[in-house]
């Protein structure tokens, strides 16, 4: 039994779930100042207020799993990425405080609106920047600003745009009336912008790393891996179609999730089996077998509860958000 492979799957799964779940509520925050009225902003925040904190549980799983199962990778990644990761954590704290204070404030509500938007935007930007920095490659000796480059900023704004699309389609699914129609129009514009970003990252990345270029464009790899961008285009076309028709409120969110899954699959294909491209594979960075087994027992016990309360939370708060009812 390959414990390193099992743990790699657990971490990939945890990060993927975090990106999808926290992605849409970060996206709602990014779109927050663009909403037309205070009432619309209240509705948008109420749509994510019951689930936002549970969504961030999955980030803890990914970080703790990396620390325990792959300590060498953790020790290599963190010193190079302290600044963007700390900025991300501070941003998440700021928006978490804004969730609770905004509904209690009156004269200072504008401040908490700004905190919610700024925290969401900064957290999304830093997450995308970290992804770009990892793909770009990290130096052997930590450098505080090596993570900051044109490529990483581009990937950062790509993630911001993707999260905004998730947030717009979530708002479309959870609201009614003029706010729903506004979210549908925003989703169409954001889809076009995201396709530009996906195309840009897809073209830029192979030139950034020769290993990635060889993996995607060498034969026979190209015949198999080209299905990922093809499926991405088909999914984007389906999303545009359902948004244009405007008759189904759930499918746009589902298709947006599929776009993220395909992008995530493309990222995994590009860097596999490296945890620290292009220096440490998952087997190089793995902890002792006894440690992995001990941690695996803990995950086996706690994971069903995490999945269970996540499903329960979304089930309890399913359906449209009404203006006369809210979480707070």
Image: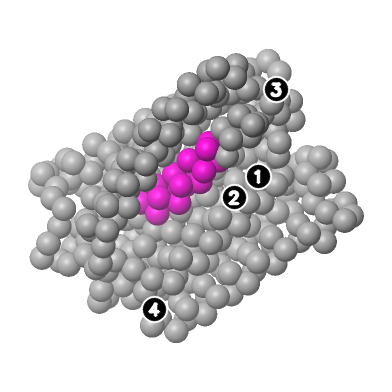
Q: Secondary structure at mark 1?
A: helix
Which one is earlier in the sequence, the residue at label 3 or at label 4? 4
Tag shown at residue 284: 3
Q: Identify the residue under disc 4.
A: 248
Q: Secondary structure at mark 3?
A: helix
Q: Is residue 166 above or below residue 236?
A: above
Mark 3 and mark 2: span between their CA atoms?
23 Å
Is the magenta region chiefly helix, strand or loop?
helix
Q: Nearer the viewer, residue 155 or 295?
A: 295
Which one is earlier in the sequence, the residue at label 2 or at label 4? 4
Mark 2 and mark 4: span between their CA atoms?
26 Å
Which one is earlier in the sequence, the residue at label 1 or at label 4? 4
Q: Nearer the viewer, residue 286 or 201?
A: 286
Which one is in front in this view, the residue at disc 3 or the one at disc 2? 3
The spot of residue 203 in percent (x, y) is: 74, 54
> Going by the image, does 277 lie left or right of 192?
right
Mark 2 and mark 1: span between their CA atoms?
6 Å
Q: Are marks 2 and 1 in contact (CB under 8 Å)?
A: yes
Q: Identify the residue under disc 2.
A: 264
Query: Where does the magenta region start and end?
Result: 10-26
């Amino acid at each position: 039994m390959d414990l390193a492979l099992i743990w790699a799957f657990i971490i990939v799964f945890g990060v993927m779930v975090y990106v999808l779940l926290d992605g849409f509520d970060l996206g709602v925050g990014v779109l927050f100042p663009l909403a037309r009225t205070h009432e619309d902003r209240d509705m948008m925040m109420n749509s994510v207020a019951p689930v936002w904190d549970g969504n961030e549980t999955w980030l803890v799983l990914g970080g703790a799993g990396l620390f325990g199962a792959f300590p060498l990778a953790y020790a290599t990644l963190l010193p190079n990425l302290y600044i963007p990761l700390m900025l991300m954590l501070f941003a998440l704290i700021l928006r978490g405080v804004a969730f609770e204070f905004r509904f209690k404030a009156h004269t200072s509500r504008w401040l908490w609106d700004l905190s919610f938007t700024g925290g969401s935007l900064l957290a999304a930007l830093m997450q995308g920047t970290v992804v770009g920095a990892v793909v770009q490659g990290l130096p052997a000796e930590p450098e505080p600003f090596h993570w900051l480059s044109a490529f990483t900023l581009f990937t950062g704004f790509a993630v911001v745009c993707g999260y905004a699309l998730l947030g717009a389609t979530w708002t479309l699914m959870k609201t009614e009336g003029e706010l729903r129609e506004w979210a549908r129009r925003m989703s169409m514009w954001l889809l076009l912008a995201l396709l530009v970003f996906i195309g840009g990252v897809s073209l830029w990345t192979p030139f950034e790393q020769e290993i990635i270029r060889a993996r995607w464009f060498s034969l026979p790899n190209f015949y198999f891996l080209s299905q990922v961008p093809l499926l991405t285009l088909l999914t984007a076309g389906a999303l545009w179609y359902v948004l244009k028709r405007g008759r189904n409120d759930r499918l746009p969110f589902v298709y947006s999730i599929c776009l993220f899954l395909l992008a995530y699959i493309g990222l995994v294909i590009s860097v596999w089996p490296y945890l620290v491209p292009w220096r440490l594979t998952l087997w190089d960075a793995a902890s002792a077998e006894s440690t992995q087994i001990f941690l695996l027992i803990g995950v086996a016990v706690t994971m069903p509860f995490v999945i269970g309360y996540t499903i329960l939370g979304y089930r309890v708060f399913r359906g449209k958000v009404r203006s006369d009812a809210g979480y707070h």
